[in-house]
Image (tube, rainbow, N blue to C red):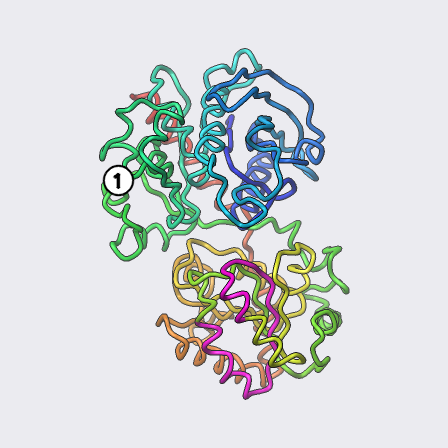
């Protein structure tokens, strides 16, 4: 099957969160399964060099954003072909994929990501000129959602289209005037289209015009059809429920393997758990904590936001620190939450360590060195960190929502994690206290670690599920 993934980031080229891991991991798994997969993303500064990309095809100036070329390369460390949309006036700049160096949205983000979708549509219809055309276009999140909308409005023979919601909270909503800038007709700005509460929504365009919709866990697929979880789009999602599929994300079990992870201080695995202690000592040393083997170490790697429940952790941790406990945090986000965590570390310098920012190698070390891993999210479409944590022997403490509910079972029900229901600090504290009680039983703790490490979270099942969705999308496209 010829598959074109359209995404704003991919691990190996640029990463701000789990979307990058999913885009790269799914493409690689499908490639390994024999599918003909390409990945399309913007040529941010430095990406062409990382992908060893060369000029493939001039594209003119599709949306008035400046001269545009298509560069072809490989996703680093894989055999997945990558096509980079090279528009220097839009992508070759300081800052990240979405924000400038001061943390503000680029004002031309509508044009930047409309161009990504527009080029995906162009590749789908100009395939013979390039020697390759997709059977299905898979758009990831709002940044890619103009692709299915454009293909719908162009009409004619086209590939099947799929839009995946990685987080419904982020919808790419802009003023109505952008409809003409993104290359869609005025008729697209309608309730039966891309209009959402007086704005033009990139994501709604993808959800409305795609042949099929997927999201990243079965539980989240149910939650987003409710008024409380639907972020204002629950009506549309309910109306398309027969075309909405919840497919649990996988992880790259080759990249996330403590037996061969070069970022760790000591390799270990289910049959050689002993060396794991060296990673805990190294993590304590890195953060300046007391190097106490018997004190439980709690890890957190996250975007720092209320969605992720960081405020719940901040409310719960002072009382938890009355017990022997250490905490390490890696992440960035809300400046108020960042400063609150820094204050906590200043108050408890040998028990709390905080690294504001993101460091891929350090994230691996946190998973390998922590005893517990906390994910107190208010909502969580899928979550990958709890899977990484279990694979590395850190037992998860999570709120029972979305993909967390689909991947973590409480120890009371035969699982290897600790779950809680209510969105409050007391519920989180109670789950943490239960975890600390189990930690005190060393033999039981070791059995739970081994149970967690032996679970499989690879892409195999999801890749098969996506193949079924793609087949349905192709059939839908051919019947319109």
Instruction: Examine the structure image and report whether residue 324 is included in the region drawn in magenta.
Output: yes
Q: Secondary structure at mark 1?
A: loop
Q: Position of residue 180 (x, y in %)?
A: 35, 24
Q: Position of residue 143 (x, y in %)?
A: 45, 37
98 relative position to 247: left or right? right
* Residue 401: quarter of image: bottom left
Instruction: Examine the structure image and report whether residue 194 is included in the region drawn in magenta.
Output: no
Q: Position of residue 404 (x, y in %)?
A: 44, 61
Which residue corresponds to mark 1?
Answer: 198
Q: Residue at x 75, y 70 (%)?
A: 282
Q: Which residues are magenta?
A: 312-340
289 relative position to 175: left or right? right
Q: Residues within 10 Å of mark 1 (few under 14, many from 20)?
A: few
Which quarter of the rendered picture does the C terminus lie within?
Answer: top left
In front of the other: 117 or 44: 44
* Residue 369: quarter of image: bottom right
In front of the other: 110 or 204: 110
Q: Residue at x 73, y 57 (%)?
A: 263
């Amino acid at each position: 099957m010829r598959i074109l993934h359209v995404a704003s980031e991919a691990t190996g080229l640029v990463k701000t969160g789990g979307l990058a891991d999913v885009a790269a991991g799914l493409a690689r798994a499908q490639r390994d399964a024999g599918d003909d997969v390409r990945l399309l993303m913007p040529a941010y500064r430095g990406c062409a060099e990382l992908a060893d990309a060369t000029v493939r095809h001039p594209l003119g100036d599709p949306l008035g954003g400046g001269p545009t070329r298509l560069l072809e390369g490989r996703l680093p460390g894989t055999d997945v072909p990558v096509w980079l949309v090279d528009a220097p006036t839009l992508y070759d700049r300081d800052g990240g994929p979405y924000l400038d160096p001061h943390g503000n949205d680029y004002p031309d983000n509508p044009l930047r990501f409309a161009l990504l979708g527009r080029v995906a549509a162009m590749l789908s219809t100009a395939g013979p000129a390039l020697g390759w055309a997709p059977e299905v276009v898979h758009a990831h999140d709002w940044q890619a959602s103009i692709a299915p909308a454009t293909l719908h409005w162009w009409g004619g023979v086209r590939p099947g289209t799929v839009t995946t919601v990685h987080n419904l909270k982020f919808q790419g909503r802009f003023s109505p005037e952008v409809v003409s800038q993104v290359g869609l007709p005025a008729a697209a700005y309608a309730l039966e289209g891309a209009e959402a509460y007086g704005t033009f929504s990139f994501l709604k365009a993808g959800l409305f015009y795609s042949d099929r919709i997927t999201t990243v866990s079965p539980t989240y697929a149910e939650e987003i059809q409710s008024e409380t979880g639907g972020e204002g789009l629950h009506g549309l999602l309910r109306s398309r429920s027969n075309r909405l599929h919840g497919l649990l994300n996988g992880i790259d079990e080759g990249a996330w393997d403590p037996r061969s992870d070069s970022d760790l201080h000591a390799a270990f695995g289910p049959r050689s758990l002993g060396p794991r202690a060296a990673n805990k000592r190294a993590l304590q040393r890195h953060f300046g904590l007391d190097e106490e083997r018997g004190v439980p170490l709690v890890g957190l790697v996250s975007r720092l936001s209320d969605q992720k429940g960081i405020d719940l952790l901040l409310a719960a941790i002072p009382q938890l620190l009355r017990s022997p406990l250490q905490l390490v945090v890696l992440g960035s986000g809300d400046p108020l939450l960042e400063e609150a965590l820094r204050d906590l570390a200043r108050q408890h310098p040998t028990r709390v360590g905080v690294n504001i920012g993101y460091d891929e190698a350090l994230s691996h070390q946190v998973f390998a060195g922590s005893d517990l891993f906390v994910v107190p999210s208010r909502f969580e479409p899928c979550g990958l960190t709890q899977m990484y944590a279990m694979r590395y022997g850190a037992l998860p403490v999570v709120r029972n929502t979305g993909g967390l509910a689909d991947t973590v079972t409480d120890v009371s029900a035969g699982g290897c994690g600790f779950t809680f229901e209510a969105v409050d600090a007391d519920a989180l504290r109670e789950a943490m206290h239960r975890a600390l009680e189990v930690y005190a039983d060393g033999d039981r703790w070791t059995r739970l670690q081994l149970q967690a490490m032996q679970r499989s979270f690879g892409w195999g099942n999801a890749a098969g599920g996506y193949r079924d969705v793609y087949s349905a999308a192709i059939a839908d496209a051919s019947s319109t």
